[in-house]
Image: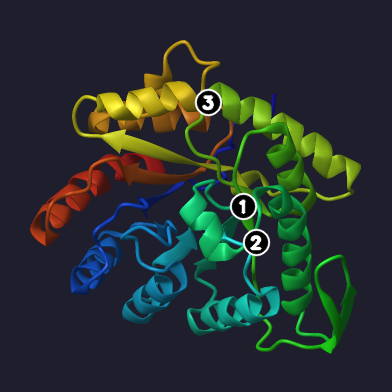
């Protein structure tokens, strides 16, 4: 097991918006402003074509234009089905304009038929397409001309500018294939619905794969997305978690209950070397004023952890 995070590694906490978020209008900007004012590290946006969640790229650009310090990430953006060169250009532009405040995170996409139709990729094709698309995007971000001859993409002398000064890619997942992909391709790990024990075991696997490929992930680039509730965990969610994690006798441990429960869970992850956190409310506040009150309480809980 990896050593716990050293005192030199900064613990940082951001806020996440789920696929069912209703913050897709002007109120989104007011919440972004409050996150900046309170000193949150980052805001992470989920993607669901068929859901109410805003498009991550548009929402990140809108938020970055209103702020100067808040970072923006995707939790996560679907990669298979997108043109990797065009997406690389969009994200390079956003990363440059925001002063390096972009935290790109990608996934294979949801298994729902509607989502698969939207991206036009069969489930069996997603993994190979993902790996090749990410390889192309990394070539784009060098700012140099490149050639690429793969199974899906063919390029000769392509060059994408501006070249971002920093573009660190975060991936999630805890399945063996996902951990291996993190070790081979990622700059950071951000899984969700896991326990501290999962985090410790997953990091060990990732570090082994990294060593096999002569690469490394920085100690402060191991994170986790933690869903939380302000009351009892809804029964439908518990049923979903039981299906998602049949290996756990108590799936409720994947969700924090209340601010005290969230703080305890974050500290348990810190004990196994995790230092970057995205907290995501299972049930979002009803309106802007409720959001502002909620974020103030969250910031009060986070402050002693980060400091």
Q: Are marks 2 and 1 in contact (CB under 8 Å)?
A: yes
Mark toward the start of the polypeptide (3 vs 1): 1
The C terminus is located in which quarter? top left
Contact between labelled residues 2 and 3, with CB atoms less than 8 Å apart: no
Can you tell which of label 3 and label 1 is closer to the viewer? 1
The structure's colour scheme is rainbow
The quadrant in which residue 144 appears is bottom right
Circle 2 packing at 10 Å, graded few (<14), some (14-19), many (20+), is many
- Residue at coordinates 39% horizontally, 59% vertically from top-left? 50
- Give how far apart the Cα atoms at labels 3 and 1 are: 24 Å
Separation (CA) of disc 2 from disc 1: 6 Å
Question: Considering only order in the chain, which callout, 2 or 3, is on the residue closer to the N terminus?
Answer: 2
Q: Between disc 2 and disc 1, whose residue precedes?
A: 2
Q: Position of residue 248 (x, y in %)?
A: 50, 15
What residue is shown with label 3?
A: 196
Please tell me which residue is depicted at 30% across the width and 66% down the height of the picture: 36
- Left or right, residue 161 beside residue 198: right
Up/down of 207 relative to 106, above or below? above
SS at mark 1 in the image: loop
- Residue 19: x and y in percent read 37, 52
Please give the label number shown on residue 218. Answer: none
Depth check, front residue: 147 or 31: 147
Q: Which mark is residue 80?
A: 2
């Amino acid at each position: 097991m990896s050593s716990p995070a050293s005192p030199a590694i900064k613990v940082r906490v951001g806020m996440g918006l789920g696929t069912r978020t209703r913050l897709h209008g002007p109120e989104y900007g007011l919440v972004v402003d409050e996150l900046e004012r309170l000193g949150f590290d980052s805001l992470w946006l989920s993607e669901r074509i068929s859901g109410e969640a805003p498009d991550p790229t548009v929402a990140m650009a809108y938020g970055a234009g209103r702020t100067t310090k808040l970072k923006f990430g995707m939790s996560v953006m679907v990669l298979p089905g997108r043109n990797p060169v065009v997406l690389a250009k969009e994200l390079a532009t956003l990363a440059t304009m925001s002063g390096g405040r972009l935290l790109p995170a990608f996934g294979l996409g949801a298994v729902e038929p509607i989502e698969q139709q939207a991206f036009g990729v069969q489930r069996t094709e997603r993994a190979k397409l993902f790996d090749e698309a990410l390889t192309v995007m990394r070539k784009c971000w060098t700012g140099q001309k490149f050639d690429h001859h793969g199974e899906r993409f063919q390029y000769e002398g392509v060059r994408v500018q501006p070249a971002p000064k920093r573009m660190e890619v975060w991936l999630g997942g805890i399945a063996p294939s996902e951990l291996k992909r993190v070790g081979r391709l990622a700059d950071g790990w951000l899984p969700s619905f896991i326990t501290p024990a999962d985090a410790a075991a997953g990091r060990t696997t990732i570090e082994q794969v990294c060593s096999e490929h002569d690469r490394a992930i920085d100690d402060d680039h191991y994170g986790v997305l933690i869903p939380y509730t302000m009351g009892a965990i809804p029964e439908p969610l518990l049923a979903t978690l039981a299906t998602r994690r049949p290996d756990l006798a108590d799936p409720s441990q994947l969700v924090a209950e209340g601010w005290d429960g969230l703080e305890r869970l974050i500290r348990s992850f810190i004990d196994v070397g995790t230092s970057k956190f995205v907290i995501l409310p299972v049930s979002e506040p009803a309106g802007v004023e409720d959001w502002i009150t909620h974020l103030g309480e969250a910031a009060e809980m986070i402050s002693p952890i980060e400091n």
